[in-house]
Amino acid sequence: MSFFNSIFSAKEHLPAKDSPEFFREVLDATREGIIVVGRDMRVVASNRAAYAAFSRRGEVLENRRLSEVVRDLHLHEAFQRALENDQVFDIKLELPGIIQKKYDVHIAPVHLGGEKNVLGFFYDITQIERLERIRQEFLSNISHELRTPLTAIMAFVETLEDGAIEDPENNLRFLSIIRKNTERMHHLINDILELSAIESGNIKIQLKEVKLAALVDEIYTNVSTKASDRSISLINEVPEDASVCADGVRLEQMLTNLIDNAVKFNRPGGKVTVRYDRSPERSGKDLISVADMGEGIPAEHLQRIFERFYRADRARSREIGGTGLGLAIVKHLARLHGGEISVKSFPSEGSVFIIELPAAK
Protein backbone atom coordinates (compact mmCIF):
# COMPACT_ATOMS: atom_id res chain seq x y z
CA MET A 1 0.00 0.00 0.00
CA SER A 2 1.37 3.42 -0.95
CA PHE A 3 1.97 6.17 1.60
CA PHE A 4 -1.00 8.18 0.29
CA ASN A 5 -3.37 5.22 0.31
CA SER A 6 -2.30 4.34 3.86
CA ILE A 7 -3.24 7.82 5.02
CA PHE A 8 -6.78 7.55 3.76
CA SER A 9 -7.37 3.90 4.55
CA ALA A 10 -7.02 4.90 8.23
CA LYS A 11 -10.06 7.19 7.93
CA GLU A 12 -13.56 5.80 8.28
CA HIS A 13 -15.35 8.64 6.51
CA LEU A 14 -13.76 10.61 3.70
CA PRO A 15 -15.14 13.86 2.28
CA ALA A 16 -15.83 13.86 -1.45
CA LYS A 17 -12.54 15.56 -2.23
CA ASP A 18 -10.62 13.55 0.32
CA SER A 19 -8.65 11.00 -1.68
CA PRO A 20 -5.04 10.00 -2.31
CA GLU A 21 -5.15 11.77 -5.67
CA PHE A 22 -6.46 14.99 -4.09
CA PHE A 23 -3.80 14.86 -1.39
CA ARG A 24 -1.11 14.32 -4.04
CA GLU A 25 -2.34 17.41 -5.93
CA VAL A 26 -2.15 19.48 -2.74
CA LEU A 27 1.42 18.36 -2.04
CA ASP A 28 2.53 19.00 -5.61
CA ALA A 29 1.07 22.51 -5.44
CA THR A 30 3.19 23.25 -2.37
CA ARG A 31 6.19 25.44 -3.12
CA GLU A 32 8.40 23.82 -0.48
CA GLY A 33 10.00 20.46 -1.14
CA ILE A 34 8.49 17.64 0.92
CA ILE A 35 10.11 14.26 1.54
CA VAL A 36 8.58 11.52 3.68
CA VAL A 37 10.93 8.83 5.00
CA GLY A 38 9.92 5.46 6.47
CA ARG A 39 11.49 3.32 9.22
CA ASP A 40 14.10 1.91 6.85
CA MET A 41 15.23 5.47 6.00
CA ARG A 42 13.92 5.11 2.47
CA VAL A 43 11.78 7.74 0.75
CA VAL A 44 8.12 6.69 0.75
CA ALA A 45 6.70 9.89 -0.74
CA SER A 46 7.81 13.24 -2.16
CA ASN A 47 6.27 16.12 -4.06
CA ARG A 48 7.05 17.91 -7.30
CA ALA A 49 9.20 20.56 -5.60
CA ALA A 50 11.36 17.83 -4.04
CA TYR A 51 11.85 16.25 -7.46
CA ALA A 52 12.91 19.61 -8.90
CA ALA A 53 15.43 20.08 -6.11
CA PHE A 54 16.84 16.60 -5.56
CA SER A 55 16.10 14.32 -8.52
CA ARG A 56 19.19 14.01 -10.70
CA ARG A 57 18.44 13.46 -14.37
CA GLY A 58 14.81 12.62 -13.55
CA GLU A 59 15.57 9.69 -11.22
CA VAL A 60 12.68 8.39 -9.11
CA LEU A 61 13.02 9.38 -5.44
CA GLU A 62 10.62 6.87 -3.90
CA ASN A 63 12.18 3.68 -2.45
CA ARG A 64 15.65 5.22 -2.49
CA ARG A 65 17.63 5.75 0.70
CA LEU A 66 17.58 9.32 1.97
CA SER A 67 21.39 9.32 1.94
CA GLU A 68 21.28 8.64 -1.82
CA VAL A 69 18.80 11.44 -2.48
CA VAL A 70 20.48 14.12 -0.32
CA ARG A 71 24.08 13.45 0.61
CA ASP A 72 24.34 15.27 3.91
CA LEU A 73 25.27 13.57 7.18
CA HIS A 74 23.53 16.08 9.48
CA LEU A 75 20.27 15.77 7.54
CA HIS A 76 20.41 11.98 7.68
CA GLU A 77 21.10 12.03 11.45
CA ALA A 78 18.19 14.45 12.07
CA PHE A 79 15.74 12.17 10.22
CA GLN A 80 17.11 9.13 12.08
CA ARG A 81 16.74 10.78 15.51
CA ALA A 82 13.22 11.98 14.65
CA LEU A 83 12.29 8.36 13.89
CA GLU A 84 13.90 6.93 17.01
CA ASN A 85 12.99 9.61 19.58
CA ASP A 86 9.81 11.25 18.22
CA GLN A 87 11.63 14.58 18.20
CA VAL A 88 11.20 17.63 15.95
CA PHE A 89 14.29 19.19 14.40
CA ASP A 90 15.05 22.36 12.46
CA ILE A 91 18.38 22.36 10.64
CA LYS A 92 20.12 24.29 7.87
CA LEU A 93 21.21 22.47 4.73
CA GLU A 94 23.77 23.64 2.20
CA LEU A 95 24.23 21.73 -1.05
CA PRO A 96 27.32 22.41 -3.19
CA GLY A 97 27.03 22.96 -6.92
CA ILE A 98 27.39 25.56 -9.64
CA ILE A 99 24.87 27.55 -7.61
CA GLN A 100 25.06 26.66 -3.93
CA LYS A 101 21.58 25.95 -2.62
CA LYS A 102 20.57 26.63 0.97
CA TYR A 103 17.55 25.26 2.81
CA ASP A 104 15.86 25.58 6.17
CA VAL A 105 14.64 22.05 6.87
CA HIS A 106 11.82 21.25 9.34
CA ILE A 107 11.79 17.56 10.30
CA ALA A 108 8.93 16.02 12.27
CA PRO A 109 7.68 12.47 12.99
CA VAL A 110 4.17 11.58 11.79
CA HIS A 111 1.99 8.56 12.62
CA LEU A 112 -0.34 7.67 9.76
CA GLY A 113 -2.10 4.43 8.95
CA GLY A 114 -0.39 2.67 11.83
CA GLU A 115 3.04 3.45 10.37
CA LYS A 116 5.68 5.77 11.77
CA ASN A 117 7.28 8.09 9.24
CA VAL A 118 9.26 11.30 9.25
CA LEU A 119 8.18 14.32 7.23
CA GLY A 120 10.78 16.84 6.01
CA PHE A 121 9.87 20.34 4.71
CA PHE A 122 12.67 21.92 2.66
CA TYR A 123 12.37 25.73 2.54
CA ASP A 124 14.65 27.12 -0.19
CA ILE A 125 16.31 30.22 1.29
CA THR A 126 18.99 30.60 -1.39
CA GLN A 127 17.48 33.77 -2.84
CA ILE A 128 16.66 35.22 0.58
CA GLU A 129 20.23 34.72 1.75
CA ARG A 130 21.61 36.22 -1.46
CA LEU A 131 19.40 39.31 -1.09
CA GLU A 132 20.37 39.66 2.56
CA ARG A 133 24.04 39.49 1.61
CA ILE A 134 23.49 42.12 -1.08
CA ARG A 135 21.64 44.32 1.43
CA GLN A 136 24.46 44.05 3.96
CA GLU A 137 27.07 44.80 1.31
CA PHE A 138 25.02 47.76 0.10
CA LEU A 139 24.69 49.21 3.60
CA SER A 140 28.39 48.64 4.24
CA ASN A 141 29.30 50.37 0.98
CA ILE A 142 26.98 53.31 1.66
CA SER A 143 28.46 53.75 5.14
CA HIS A 144 31.97 53.66 3.72
CA GLU A 145 31.19 56.07 0.88
CA LEU A 146 29.50 58.58 3.21
CA ARG A 147 32.13 58.31 5.93
CA THR A 148 34.95 59.62 3.72
CA PRO A 149 33.38 63.00 2.78
CA LEU A 150 31.82 63.39 6.24
CA THR A 151 35.22 62.93 7.89
CA ALA A 152 36.74 65.56 5.61
CA ILE A 153 33.88 68.00 6.25
CA MET A 154 34.10 67.58 10.04
CA ALA A 155 37.88 67.93 10.03
CA PHE A 156 37.89 71.21 8.08
CA VAL A 157 34.93 72.64 10.01
CA GLU A 158 36.84 72.01 13.25
CA THR A 159 39.95 73.60 11.72
CA LEU A 160 37.96 76.71 10.80
CA GLU A 161 36.37 76.84 14.26
CA ASP A 162 39.82 76.62 15.88
CA GLY A 163 40.87 79.87 14.24
CA ALA A 164 41.63 79.06 10.60
CA ILE A 165 38.60 81.10 9.55
CA GLU A 166 40.74 84.18 10.27
CA ASP A 167 43.51 82.84 7.99
CA PRO A 168 42.98 84.62 4.65
CA GLU A 169 45.44 82.35 2.84
CA ASN A 170 43.64 79.10 3.66
CA ASN A 171 40.07 79.73 4.81
CA LEU A 172 38.62 79.89 1.27
CA ARG A 173 40.53 76.73 0.32
CA PHE A 174 39.09 74.91 3.34
CA LEU A 175 35.57 76.06 2.44
CA SER A 176 36.14 74.86 -1.12
CA ILE A 177 37.08 71.40 0.17
CA ILE A 178 33.98 71.33 2.37
CA ARG A 179 31.81 72.31 -0.60
CA LYS A 180 33.41 69.64 -2.80
CA ASN A 181 32.72 66.90 -0.26
CA THR A 182 29.18 68.15 0.31
CA GLU A 183 28.52 67.96 -3.43
CA ARG A 184 29.95 64.45 -3.47
CA MET A 185 27.51 63.39 -0.75
CA HIS A 186 24.66 65.07 -2.63
CA HIS A 187 25.49 63.19 -5.84
CA LEU A 188 25.84 59.92 -3.94
CA ILE A 189 22.44 60.25 -2.24
CA ASN A 190 20.79 61.23 -5.54
CA ASP A 191 22.29 58.17 -7.26
CA ILE A 192 21.19 55.88 -4.42
CA LEU A 193 17.62 57.19 -4.63
CA GLU A 194 17.64 56.90 -8.42
CA LEU A 195 18.95 53.34 -8.41
CA SER A 196 16.46 52.35 -5.69
CA ALA A 197 13.57 53.76 -7.74
CA ILE A 198 14.71 51.89 -10.86
CA GLU A 199 15.20 48.56 -9.08
CA SER A 200 11.86 48.80 -7.29
CA GLY A 201 10.03 49.27 -10.60
CA ASN A 202 8.91 52.84 -9.87
CA ILE A 203 10.56 54.21 -13.01
CA LYS A 204 8.49 53.95 -16.18
CA ILE A 205 9.88 54.68 -19.61
CA GLN A 206 8.02 56.37 -22.45
CA LEU A 207 9.38 55.29 -25.81
CA LYS A 208 9.50 57.72 -28.69
CA GLU A 209 11.77 58.62 -31.59
CA VAL A 210 14.90 60.40 -30.38
CA LYS A 211 17.31 62.22 -32.71
CA LEU A 212 20.58 60.81 -31.46
CA ALA A 213 23.10 63.26 -32.99
CA ALA A 214 21.33 66.29 -31.49
CA LEU A 215 21.15 64.60 -28.08
CA VAL A 216 24.88 63.83 -28.12
CA ASP A 217 25.68 67.46 -29.09
CA GLU A 218 23.62 68.67 -26.13
CA ILE A 219 25.47 66.37 -23.71
CA TYR A 220 28.81 67.47 -25.17
CA THR A 221 27.86 71.09 -24.49
CA ASN A 222 27.19 70.24 -20.84
CA VAL A 223 30.58 68.53 -20.34
CA SER A 224 32.60 70.84 -22.60
CA THR A 225 34.14 72.82 -19.73
CA LYS A 226 35.32 69.68 -17.96
CA ALA A 227 36.71 68.30 -21.25
CA SER A 228 38.43 71.58 -22.13
CA ASP A 229 40.20 71.66 -18.77
CA ARG A 230 41.94 68.39 -19.74
CA SER A 231 42.32 69.21 -23.47
CA ILE A 232 39.99 66.32 -24.40
CA SER A 233 38.32 66.40 -27.81
CA LEU A 234 34.63 65.51 -28.03
CA ILE A 235 33.79 63.82 -31.34
CA ASN A 236 30.27 63.08 -32.50
CA GLU A 237 30.22 60.54 -35.34
CA VAL A 238 26.50 59.85 -35.15
CA PRO A 239 24.82 60.45 -38.55
CA GLU A 240 22.55 63.49 -38.56
CA ASP A 241 19.52 61.42 -39.58
CA ALA A 242 20.07 58.64 -37.00
CA SER A 243 17.23 58.14 -34.55
CA VAL A 244 16.52 55.52 -31.88
CA CYS A 245 13.41 54.37 -30.07
CA ALA A 246 13.95 55.31 -26.41
CA ASP A 247 12.85 57.41 -23.49
CA GLY A 248 14.65 60.66 -24.25
CA VAL A 249 15.27 61.63 -20.62
CA ARG A 250 16.58 58.19 -19.65
CA LEU A 251 18.73 57.87 -22.78
CA GLU A 252 20.27 61.25 -21.98
CA GLN A 253 20.92 60.01 -18.44
CA MET A 254 22.68 56.88 -19.73
CA LEU A 255 24.82 58.74 -22.25
CA THR A 256 25.67 61.51 -19.79
CA ASN A 257 26.99 58.92 -17.34
CA LEU A 258 29.09 57.20 -20.00
CA ILE A 259 30.42 60.40 -21.60
CA ASP A 260 31.19 61.96 -18.22
CA ASN A 261 33.15 58.82 -17.27
CA ALA A 262 34.93 58.86 -20.63
CA VAL A 263 36.09 62.42 -19.92
CA LYS A 264 37.09 61.76 -16.31
CA PHE A 265 39.02 58.54 -17.00
CA ASN A 266 40.60 59.70 -20.26
CA ARG A 267 44.21 60.70 -20.67
CA PRO A 268 44.99 64.44 -21.06
CA GLY A 269 44.70 65.40 -24.73
CA GLY A 270 42.63 62.29 -25.50
CA LYS A 271 39.36 61.90 -27.36
CA VAL A 272 35.79 60.85 -26.55
CA THR A 273 33.93 59.47 -29.57
CA VAL A 274 30.24 58.57 -29.80
CA ARG A 275 29.11 56.38 -32.70
CA TYR A 276 25.88 54.81 -33.89
CA ASP A 277 25.37 51.58 -35.81
CA ARG A 278 22.68 49.03 -36.65
CA SER A 279 23.89 45.59 -35.62
CA PRO A 280 24.25 43.28 -38.66
CA GLU A 281 24.42 40.15 -36.48
CA ARG A 282 21.41 41.07 -34.33
CA SER A 283 18.64 42.31 -36.54
CA GLY A 284 16.54 45.05 -35.04
CA LYS A 285 19.21 46.31 -32.62
CA ASP A 286 20.57 49.84 -32.42
CA LEU A 287 24.10 50.18 -31.06
CA ILE A 288 25.38 53.38 -29.43
CA SER A 289 29.04 53.33 -28.44
CA VAL A 290 31.07 55.70 -26.27
CA ALA A 291 34.83 55.31 -26.67
CA ASP A 292 37.68 56.92 -24.73
CA MET A 293 41.49 56.82 -24.92
CA GLY A 294 42.21 56.13 -21.26
CA GLU A 295 44.30 53.42 -19.64
CA GLY A 296 41.62 50.80 -20.14
CA ILE A 297 40.00 48.46 -17.63
CA PRO A 298 41.93 45.35 -16.51
CA ALA A 299 40.34 42.14 -17.79
CA GLU A 300 39.64 40.82 -14.27
CA HIS A 301 37.34 43.79 -13.59
CA LEU A 302 35.25 43.69 -16.77
CA GLN A 303 32.68 41.19 -15.46
CA ARG A 304 31.96 43.29 -12.37
CA ILE A 305 32.24 46.84 -13.65
CA PHE A 306 28.43 47.31 -13.71
CA GLU A 307 27.94 46.26 -10.08
CA ARG A 308 26.93 48.84 -7.50
CA PHE A 309 29.91 50.59 -5.88
CA TYR A 310 32.39 48.45 -7.83
CA ARG A 311 35.45 50.37 -8.97
CA ALA A 312 38.40 49.11 -10.96
CA ASP A 313 40.54 51.94 -9.54
CA ARG A 314 39.03 53.01 -6.23
CA ALA A 315 41.58 55.66 -5.36
CA ARG A 316 41.32 57.45 -8.69
CA SER A 317 37.54 57.16 -8.83
CA ARG A 318 37.15 58.83 -5.45
CA GLU A 319 39.72 61.47 -6.36
CA ILE A 320 37.71 62.56 -9.41
CA GLY A 321 34.38 62.35 -7.61
CA GLY A 322 32.70 59.16 -8.80
CA THR A 323 29.91 57.62 -6.71
CA GLY A 324 30.40 54.07 -7.99
CA LEU A 325 26.72 53.85 -9.02
CA GLY A 326 26.70 55.43 -12.48
CA LEU A 327 27.32 52.26 -14.49
CA ALA A 328 24.82 50.29 -12.38
CA ILE A 329 22.20 52.92 -13.23
CA VAL A 330 23.08 52.68 -16.94
CA LYS A 331 22.74 48.88 -16.82
CA HIS A 332 19.29 49.00 -15.24
CA LEU A 333 18.03 51.75 -17.56
CA ALA A 334 19.24 49.83 -20.62
CA ARG A 335 17.37 46.73 -19.43
CA LEU A 336 14.23 48.79 -18.81
CA HIS A 337 14.38 49.57 -22.54
CA GLY A 338 14.68 45.85 -23.33
CA GLY A 339 18.35 46.37 -24.17
CA GLU A 340 21.76 45.78 -22.63
CA ILE A 341 25.08 47.48 -21.88
CA SER A 342 28.49 45.93 -22.53
CA VAL A 343 32.12 47.03 -22.50
CA LYS A 344 35.27 46.30 -24.46
CA SER A 345 38.60 47.47 -23.12
CA PHE A 346 42.16 47.43 -24.34
CA PRO A 347 45.13 48.05 -22.00
CA SER A 348 46.69 51.49 -22.60
CA GLU A 349 44.31 52.09 -25.51
CA GLY A 350 40.98 52.87 -23.88
CA SER A 351 37.48 51.46 -23.39
CA VAL A 352 34.32 51.27 -25.46
CA PHE A 353 30.91 51.10 -23.76
CA ILE A 354 28.07 49.91 -25.99
CA ILE A 355 24.38 50.48 -25.35
CA GLU A 356 22.21 48.03 -27.27
CA LEU A 357 18.58 49.06 -27.78
CA PRO A 358 15.72 47.40 -29.65
CA ALA A 359 15.10 49.29 -32.90
CA ALA A 360 11.74 50.89 -33.62
CA LYS A 361 9.37 48.61 -35.49
Image (cartoon, grey):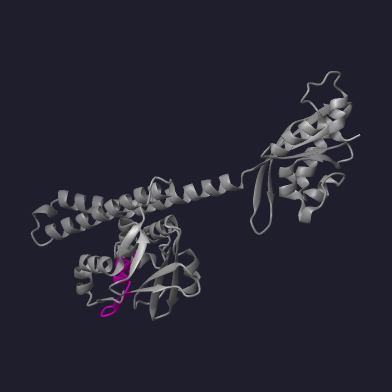
Q: Is residue 295 magenta?
A: no
x, y (%) of residue 194? 35, 50
x, y (%) of residue 65? 85, 46
Picture quarter with the C terminus: bottom left
Q: Is residue 3 left or right of residue 142?
A: right
> At 57% from the left edge and 44% from the top edge, which residue is drawn?
128
x, y (%) of residue 342? 45, 68
Given residues 206 and 342, the one toward you in this image is: 206
Relative vertical location of residue 309 with respect to residue 214 in this rendering, above or below? above
Quarter of the image where one finds residue 274: bottom left
Relative vertical location of residue 56 with respect to residue 104 in this rendering, above or below? below
Q: Is residue 97 left or right of residue 215?
A: right
> At 77% from the left edge and 35% from the top edge, which residue is drawn?
24
Picture quarter with the N terminus: top right
Q: Is residue 262 magenta?
A: yes
x, y (%) of residue 335? 45, 57
Residue pushed farthest front?
A: 361
Given residues 228 and 108, the one toward you in this image is: 228
Q: Is residue 88 left or right of residue 311?
A: right
Q: Which residues are magenta?
A: 258-274
Given residues 13 and 42, the one toward you in this image is: 13
- Decide if residue 230 is in sight here: yes
> At 85% from the left edge and 21% from the top edge, which residue is drawn?
11
> At 41% from the left edge and 59% from the top edge, which residue is drawn?
334
Relative vertical location of residue 34 with respect to residue 174 in this rendering, above or below? above
